[in-house]
Image (cartoon, rainbow, N blue to C red):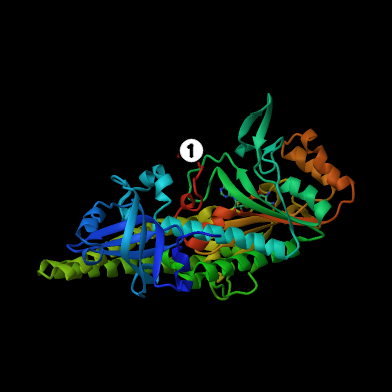
Amino acid sequence: MDVQHTYIRNFSSHTADTVTVKGWVSNIRFSKTNIFIDFRDGSGFCQVVMSQDVLGEERFEEAKKLTRESSLAVSGTLIADERQLGGYEIQANSFCVYHIAVDFPIKANETEHGVRFLEDNRHIWLRSRRQWAIMRVRNQVIMGIHAYFQDNGFVQMDSPLFTGNAAEGSTTLFETDFFGEPAYLAQTGQLYGEAMAMAQGLIYTFGPTFRAEKSNTPRHLAEFWMIEPEMAFFDNDMNMSVIEGMVRSVVSRVLEKCETELKMLDRDTSKLQFAAEPFPRIKYVDAVKILRGELEINGKNAIALQEEDLAHAKALIEQHTAEIAEREATIKGGVKKGIRKFNEQKIAALQAEIKELEEQVRNIPNWIESAKNFVDGEDFGGSDETVLTRVFDAPVMVHDWPAKIKAFYMKEVDGNPDYVKGVDLLAPEGFGEVVGGSERETDIDVLVKKIEEHKLPQDVFEWYLDLRRFGSVPHSGFGLGLERLVRWICNLNHMRETIPFARRYGRLNP
Ligand code: 4AD
Ligand code: MG
């Protein structure tokens, strides 16, 4: 790629003393004879210093007109400086303004805004450091997924987005008008993936999927990206090995390639280095026992752990409250501006932490109640997944689920038709289900019966049944929710930040 200017990400291999960069003012501070710019060019961040001495009075006056998010080209001396943002500083010799931005609405400290305001301004919120970092992680997650499958002989396929049938429950369908016929936006590409797997052996889809879920939760989008591999001649154990291989490979790629981004997000990366190897695989019936506190894992009891977490949160709140009082007293006693500022920042951070801890203190007793009283045969709720995964040091695979809560295409467990060979991968730290998959039913009579039981129209599934009529083979696959994985890796409160423009219940714009 031949460009005349330099990208910040290439500074470390830049050999000349001077550079030209093109980008935007992320933040700006003025002193009498210097201007300090947090400069971003899309590829990274660095500090630009504009000095009256160097620029001369006239140009310095021009530079004073710069505002946050104004765009400009800067040429100057490149100085490596560890203390600076991105490790470099540019001492500007000259600059050329593209555009002066007037009153950029998002404050430098975005946490001062409510999240609704930020979402309304998503088109410009994307420029913030945090959002920049998340999108970069998303990019590496995507590349990591492709790399894993391509390296293992899978063929990428595109499945249709207009479909004639439901596959994941008829209550979450978006209906559209397809030349006068009702059509649905795809909830999954799986069924088409199964057809392609019978042609190519190993395939994966990577595309948008749609669910009309009227749930305004941190982990439900109406439009999300799903990756759905399908493997001929794989049983559910082999399926689980692929899930684990893919997750490990993607996570380690991100740890390697996104060190800066994860640091910007304050991600505790030790949480992504999983102690348990391989990922634990437990049956649904055992997961229920663990959840209710009836079965311990390595001496850890799920209910007792929650009680400990609750006590710990309460103790921390007390500790933080005491520290805040102490710091407030220090400020009151009269101190220098710098020390006051430092203490004020500490207090704000402690208050934010207390807020989170208070939420835990409110939630955990409910979680415990719900876990203790969990009814065997039901699906796990979000809090159940949190309580269950807390006893493990790695993501957990729960397999062999009750048939009645899973999709029609899952293969019955041999000799026990009340259960099916489904698997969910549950991420730790409360992130819950990231992957859902199964071995597929191959018995055409069982499938026909299931289609009936699920009240699905058999005629639109005739083509799917053909896959069992002509050279049917055991096969398995799964669906990975891209945004769920990005949310977990980045440790985000909500999935709204994991996708450029979220589409979810109550949010269609911008
Ligand atoms: O568990 P699900 O519904 O499984 C399927 O769709 C299968 N057809 C997959 C397969 O076997 N080929 O969805 C798979 C994953 C979930 O584990 C979750 O990560 C994600 O898709 N997902 C969602 N992500 C965001 N918003 C939603 N509303 C989601 N629903 C599912
Ligand atoms: Mg699922």
Residue sitting at 53 percent across and 68 percent down?
Answer: 257
- For badge 1, the amino acid type reads Leu
Task: State the image quarter where residue 413 is shown.
Answer: bottom right
Residue at label 1? Answer: 508
Residue 314 % position (x, y)? 34, 65
Residue 69 % position (x, y)? 34, 51
Q: Nearer the viewer, residue 137 or 177?
A: 137
Q: Nearer the viewer, residue 66 or 204?
A: 66
Q: Nearer the viewer, residue 295 or 221?
A: 221
Tell me if 393 is positioned left or right of 446 in this view.
left
Residue 280 % position (x, y)? 63, 69
Residue sitting at 47 percent across and 49 percent down?
Answer: 496
Task: State the image quarter where residue 340 is shown.
Answer: bottom left
Task: Please identify the residue farthest to the top as the structure is shown.
Answer: 180
> Which quadrant holds the C terminus?
top left
Q: Which SS class for mark 1?
A: loop
> Which quadrant holds the N terminus?
bottom right
Tell me if residue 309 comes above or below residue 25 in the rendering: below
Give the total number of marks visible in the rendering: 1
Residue sitting at 55 percent across and 55 percent down?
Answer: 484
Q: Nearer the viewer, residue 225 or 51?
A: 51
Tell me if 56 is positioned left or right of 450 in this view.
left
